[in-house]
Image (cartoon, helix red, strand yellow):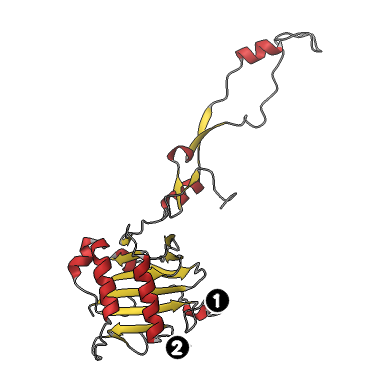
Amino acid sequence: RAGCVPDGASWRRGGPMSVIDLTDDAAAAEEEVDAPPPLHEPPAMAASGGGGCGGGLSGGEEAEGAEQPKKRPRVNALALLMGAARARPLVGWEVAEERISEELEAHLATWVLRERFFADESKKVRNFGLAWRQGGGHDLTAPFRPIPSELKGLWAAILPTLPSAIASMGEPNQVALKRYHLDGACHYAPHRSGDVLGYHCDCQFNDVRYVVGVSLLSDSSLVFRNTQKQVHKRIILQRATYSMVGEALTDWTHALFDIRHPGRLSVTYRLVCS
């Protein structure tokens, strides 16, 4: 934040998927300053008597002959501390370079309307595959809810854009269709603030190997936070596909922000193992 950068620290901003890192400048942690004059130093005496100002060295001669003050290093402890607290990188998060087509996005939105998935105002999310257990977590013993062909087709479309590590793990066994600031007719409804989850971890109740999401209808932001209160913010563009594995799932919690008009639909694929 402007005006809040300590000595020896600088703000560095990355590209469009940027994170703000506070880094220390090694050169700024130690700097040269003039040493103050010793306390109680007696004033310079004239070279010869005579009282008054007539005797002694001239001002130029004093400056030429006087010993220059020594330099001493000053350690900027705050800069060193801020450098030690540098944010960890967000490992395991990726956004695919290629987004899904506008035609596929329109087809999915029409399908959601036709099936009336959110005609019930109390429904925020519709789960397919593994059911959600009362009290938290996916229920691996409950009957499997068939995954609709539209969501299987979307998975097939985005699979070539995903990291190879995710593709090698196998197909997802849980899919969530969620709405944000949308009413039952998929019209913008900003009053539905309860649609947005707070900070959470997908691995809180289960061993989730990967999370793959597709953001529909609008842009938004996903903010990651760890136990050291370090933060990463990522912009998710409309029709973008993103993925989380490893540390991004286990070491960070995340929450969605900046949901814009006309609202948001998301399709989230998970591979839940236990």
Instruction: Give coordinates of residue 273: x percent, y percent.
Output: 22, 78
User: What is the CA distance from the residue labelled 1 to the residue labelled 2?
Assistant: 17 Å
Q: Which residue is mark 1?
A: 190
Q: Earlier in the sequence, mark 1 or mark 2?
A: 2
Of 138 and 27, nearer the camera is 138
Q: Is residue 214 visible?
A: no
Q: Residues within 10 Å of mark 1 (few under 14, many from 20)?
A: some
Residue drawn 70% across and 16% down?
45
Q: Classify residue 3 as left or right of residue 55.
A: left
Q: Amino acid at mark 2?
A: Ala
Q: Amino acid at mark 1?
A: Pro
Crowd tier of the residue under label 2, counting other residues whose Cα lies within 10 Å: few below 14, some 14–19, many 20 or above: few
- Asked if residue 147 lies left or right of residue 215, the reply is left
Q: Nearer the viewer, mark 1 or mark 2?
A: 2
Q: Which residue is mark 2?
A: 119
Tell me: 65 left or right of 141. Answer: right
Coordinates of residue 222 in the picture (x, y in percent): 43, 66
Q: What secondary structure is found at the residue carrying circle 1?
A: loop
Q: Secondary structure at mark 2?
A: loop
Viewer-nearest residue: 74 or 39 = 74
In the rendered image, the vertical position of residue 136 relative to residue 102, given as above or below: below
